[in-house]
Amino acid sequence: MADINQSVLEAINVAEVTNSLDLAVKLGVDHQRIVGVIKSLENVTDFIVTTQINEKKWQPTEEGQQIISKGSHEALVWAATPEGEDGIEMPLLMSKLEGNTGKLGLNKALALKWVALVKKDGKQFVTRKVNEIDDKVMIYLRSFNQGKFNEIPEAVKLDLKKRKLISEVVIKSYQIVKGTQFTLKVEKAETDITAEMILKDTWKEKRFKDYNFNAMGISPDRGHLHPLLKVREQFRQIFLEMGFTEMPTNNFVESSFWNFDALFQPQQHPARDAHDTFFISDPQFSDDFPKDYLEKVKTVHSTGGFGSQGYKYDWKIDETRKNLLRTHTTAVSARMLYKAAERYRQNPEEPFTPLKYFSIDRVFRNETLDATHLAEFHQIEGVVADVGLNLGDLMGILDQFFQKLGIKSLKFKPAYNPYTEPSMEIFSYHEGLKKWVEIGNSGVFRPEMLLPMGLPENVTVIAWGLSLERPTMIKYKIDNIRDLVGHKVDLQMVYNNPICIIDEN
């Protein structure tokens, strides 16, 4: 490559104007290699001045090149037709010629009267009408390769173009003129001034590369938001628009007390079995409970209270002390409601201030992993507390919430939850599946859960929850949850997917 660079420099030096195509022919190298050298010289300030020249040129197509080497279609038909009056049966002639040569060539040969069609015994035969032919199509196409384009009649050019035997191409070349700083040796321009140049005062003799202030620069490496984080942010914005406050959910390890007992979930409930919950071995137990509240929870479970007869079982402190990975973020809601009730425990006459909380965070369940289930997933939860709320208020706020998600059609089905009564499963009509699908769960918190906390008797708390993974999988058309979360995630998918905008249609 260095020899070519020097040869190009010498050729430019001796000529007033140099053409890149002429240089390629003179040096016997591919034109693109000459263009590469010219482009590198253009980066040197005032070294050369170039002008791009676009020249239109007609050249044979791939089919035209085959004709140059083998002859035209009509000539091949004539050559395949035997001499004599008998000729050759047309189907046999067609079988002797490749591709469309027979069909295309026969029509042309008939028009040129090189051959004729004769019927014998109900069959068609092709016979020769001339003893010699002049394959002008092949001759004209060879003239293109020899640069004799101007010698070909215009009518012939149009016919060859119509037959797609020639095509027009644009040949790009460069006209080169020496610049004010041209030399036979290219000195690499410095990109930065160094401390050594300043100390030795050599910077004055150096040539520096101009800064290109219009260059975009190299894109810095950066992180990209996972689809779950994008959809999570959309849900978060909806809650904030509706006036909710986000709950702190950074405690993945909970005690059974806050995760189950405070939610009026009995200690013999199947969800508290090791087959459904991850229990912690170290530390195995927790003792950080409000003592008065603990006693009230124990009482309402075992003997009842606040208008309830309870579950009528022997409530055990060892069971409530067990630590676990939280199975739902409702444990956080219980903590927040207990904290909010503190002022009313101290001053029962004080008027209640409405509360609107939400959370979006991870929960853990001892699930069998499959295409739609993981042992670790995200729960979205909304909680509203106010005086006199009822089931109609819950349905109304759910309608507003899902309207903002673009979900217009809702249905509610009665359900059972240990800590809500009444409880409702939420269904929406899925246009793609053409059926109603479950999208969440909801309910009104039981008095057995709220009154032991110290909340006023006229305060009602409504709540609902749904998964974060399911809407994300629908949004990004992912049919296996293990492609969304875990070691099988395609990082290129994370990079390519745009910022999430929840569709409202």
Image (tube, rainbow, N blue to C red):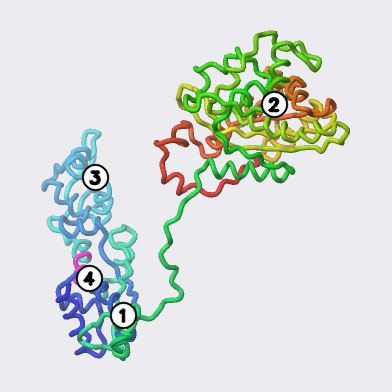
Cα distance between the residues tagged 3 and 1: 61 Å
Which of label 2 and label 3 is nearer to you?
Answer: 2
SS for dot 2:
strand
Left or right: where 336 falls relative to 318: right
Question: Looking at the image, is mark 2 or mark 4 earlier in the sequence?
Answer: 4
Residue located beneath label 2 in the image: 442
Taking the magenta stretch, the answer to whether it contains residue 147 is yes
Do the numbered discs 1 and 2 sit on residues whose CB atoms are within 8 Å?
no
Cα distance between the residues tagged 4 and 3: 38 Å
* Residue drawn at 65 percent across, 41 percent down: 504
Which quadrant is the N terminus positioned in? Answer: bottom left
- Of the pair 150 and 281, the residue shown nearer to us: 281
| Mark 3 Cα shell of 10 Å, populated few (<14), some (14-19), many (≥20) | few
Q: Amino acid at mark 3?
A: Gly
**Label for residue 190?**
1
- Of the pair 176 and 325, the residue shown nearer to us: 325
Residue 201 percent coordinates (x, y): 30, 89
SS for dot 1:
loop
Which of label 2 and label 4 is nearer to you?
Answer: 2
Question: Looking at the image, is mark 2 or mark 3 earlier in the sequence?
Answer: 3
Residue located beneath label 3 in the image: 99
Main SS of residues in magenta:
helix
SS for dot 3:
loop
Question: Looking at the image, is mark 4 or mark 3 earlier in the sequence?
Answer: 4
Residue 480 percent coordinates (x, y): 46, 31
* Residue drawn at 77 percent across, 21 percent down: 447
Do the numbered discs 1 and 4 sit on residues whose CB atoms are within 8 Å?
no
Residue located beneath label 4 in the image: 33
| Mark 1 Cα shell of 10 Å, populated few (<14), some (14-19), many (≥20) | few
